[in-house]
Amino acid sequence: MRRTTSEKAERKAVGMIPKFRGMLLSGEWVIGNLTIIPKTIDVVEEGYYISNKVGMPFAFKVRPETVGMSTGREDKHGVEIFEGDIVRFSVFNYYGDQKNSEMIGVVSYYKCDACFIVENDTDYWEGKELSGIFSTMTVIGNTHEHPELLKEKP
């Protein structure tokens, strides 16, 4: 999802506004603001809801296990990267000038350090390390629809 210049300028002006993605019960994905209703209130059931800028009542109930926050970054093809995405990326040597290998990992939010990481069965990348590989990333799926991609060889 490519952003227009005005959207980028607006985001810069107001700071990072968290954006979330979640899957509807029908299997369709929606992106927007997240609201968690802890208990039923009048006609609104408890649950996780994603809405557009207008907010409630224009909100969609989503499956809680599918909710993921946007990293605020895009892959090399301009696709927005969300928590739960499966990405293919290149790992560079310590000098940053030569590709050692291609890897596949899952984007996660690491609460202890308040940052996004990419992890797989053998390693993880965070912080400065992660910033350097965003430009090589390609979103190839997500853990909710395509968990088999994690077993794929890069």
Image (spheres, rainbow, N blue to C red):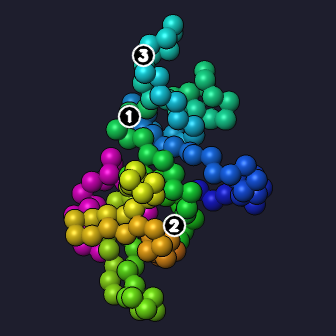
Which residue corresponds to mark 2? 75
Give the residues in magenta: 139-154
Residue ID at (39%, 58%): 107
Regarding residue 18, the answer to whether it shows in the image is yes
The crowd level at tag 3 (other Cα within 10 Å; few <14, some 14-19, many 20+) is few
Residue ID at (32%, 67%): 124
Pair 2/3: label in front = 3
Using the image, determine if residue 19 lies above or below residue 13: above
Disc on res. 39 = 3
Marks 1 and 2: in contact by CB < 8 Å? no
Pair 3/1: label in front = 3
Residue ID at (27%, 65%): 120
Tell which circle, 2 or 3, labels the residue nearer the N-terminal end. Answer: 3
**Which image quarter is the N terminus in?**
bottom right
- Which residue reaches farthest top? 42
Q: Is residue 148 left or right of residue 11?
A: left
Which amino acid type is shown beneath numbered disc 1? Pro
Disc on res. 64 = 1
